[in-house]
Image (cartoon, rainbow, N blue to C red):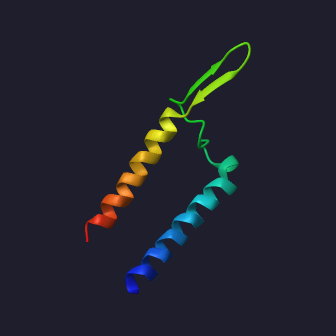
Amino acid sequence: MAALGRTLILVGAVLLVVGLLITFSARLPFRIGRLPGDILIRGKHGVFYFPLATCLLASVLVSLVVWLLGRR
């Protein structure tokens, strides 16, 4: 049961950080989802957006968290 409790605390902390980032995103020096390296192509009849840099950053962060948790 102790492991479940720790997992729930960790999930809650992650949700808190994500919520704060979303809430205060306008005040950050960078906009999550609009980083340099994200691909945006505007055409006559539509827009294509692929958040390449944002996906890479999210992948690195998730990999780091999983690596840190797996070190036990």
Name the image quarter holding the N terminus: bottom left
Residue 30's place in the image compared with 2, above or below, is above
Give the residue at x 39% y 86%: 2
Give the residue at x 53% y 31%: 36
Name the image quarter holding the C terminus: bottom left
x, y percent for residue 62: 41, 53
x, y percent for residue 9: 49, 76
- Name, please, the residue furthest toward the left: 71
Residue 48's place in the image compared with 1, above or below, is above
- Name, please, the residue furthest toward the bottom: 1
x, y percent for residue 32: 59, 43
Residue 53's place in the image compared with 17, above or below, is above
Residue 3 sits in which quadrant? bottom left
Residue 38 sits in which quadrant? top right
Give the residue at x 29% y 65%: 70
Left or right: where 24 falls relative to 3: right
How many circles with numbers are drawn on the protein?
A: 0
Residue 55's place in the image compared with 18, above or below, is above
- Name, please, the residue furthest toward the right: 45
Residue 50 sits in which quadrant? top right
x, y percent for residue 21: 61, 55
Give the residue at x 68% y 15%: 43
